[in-house]
Image (cartoon, grey):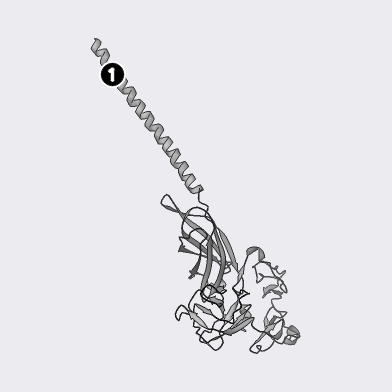
Amino acid sequence: MNSKRGLSAVVIALIIILLSLVAVGAVWVVVKNIISGGVKEMDLGKFTIDLDITNAYEQRGNITVIVERKAGEGELVKIKFILSDKKNSEIITEEANLSELESRNFFLHPVVLVSTDIVRVSVAPVFKSAGSEIIGGIADTYYINSNGEQQDEEECTPDCTGLQCGPDPECGESCGTCTGTDVCSNGVCVQQECEPESIETTCGTWVCGTKINNCGAEVNCGEDCLEGQMCLEGNCMKITPVNSGKVEETWPGTSGMYFGSADLPMDFNYQEYYIEFPGSEEADCLLIAIYKFPIEGYSKSHIGFNFETLIETGNDYQIWATREECEA
């Protein structure tokens, strides 16, 4: 009898121990999930990746975007570029293991949008956490104006000068709507059946360029200006480059990506100006992506592009403030 009681006590003790182990295991599962979730939140919370677009421009059908990574923790693995022409967007993903404070040029080749129509570029970081790639929010947005030069969003001021309706040419904001049966044509509200005024009435004193007549049609006010002239407010005005000289060295090799010249100033930076090479095989007006003053081992200022060119030693060059002047 006593042996049976002893056996029952042992069985009860074993059952209590097993139940205790089960309870501890259940508590550990809950605690583990809480800890794992907390660790993941802490892991995501420590990412402070910040990107800054320092320049963006269109050249030869491509979009060049210069991105700088600011100080901040996180394993950056890719960058998503969102290109927009105000109506449609295209996303291009590029590998980008940028270190903190590192800057890099990205050359984007849009296939959906027309490169010359792109006006806005945004970037979003893609970072790695616990083996997974996570897309961050938009870190920076950059605007490209009609000259292919950079323009901050807050600097985009609508210009409806001479317009009654339709979008303004700078920001795409509405300049108004027509009333009644009038229709909008080239920014002017006109009757559906309109008798155009004479060219003399439309152009007035203008001898070049185009103006919009009373029916919203574009009217040519004269012949093209002579070489070295530019049509400004209906008059052909002589224009001169801000700097000119000769190409003295090109590198690397014959790529024409960089050139130096003693004619380039050492006290003024022409980055984001435009340059042409009259009489050379390089027929395009190129945006100056890099302008460097003399460095150790090289005593001349030098200019760089983000692609190969056809410039050669001995070519003449001219630097202009805008693309329009360069192409005049």
Quadrant of residue 159 in the image? bottom right
Residue at (66, 63) in percent of width and height: 154
Residue at (56, 64) in percent of width and height: 53
Look at the image and tell me in which quarter the C terminus lies: bottom right
> Circle 1 sits on which residue?
10
Residue at (26, 14) in percent of width and height: 6
The residue closer to the viewer here, 27 or 163, is 27
Q: Residues within 10 Å of mark 1 (few under 14, many from 20)?
A: few
The residue closer to the viewer here, 317 or 29, is 317
The residue closer to the viewer here, 63 or 206, is 63
Residue type at numbered disc 1: Val
Q: How many marks?
A: 1
* Relative image position of residue 33 (x, y in whole percent): 43, 39
* Relative image position of residue 147 (x, y in whole percent): 61, 74
* Relative image position of residue 1 (x, y in whole percent): 24, 9
Residue at (62, 81) in percent of width and height: 243
In the image, farthest residue toward the top: 1
Relative to residue 165, is residue 3 drawn left or right? Answer: left
**Is residue 46 positioned above or below 101 on the image?**
above
**Is residue 197 positioned above or below 4 on the image?**
below
* Relative image position of residue 103 (x, y in whole percent): 52, 64
* Disc 1, SS: helix
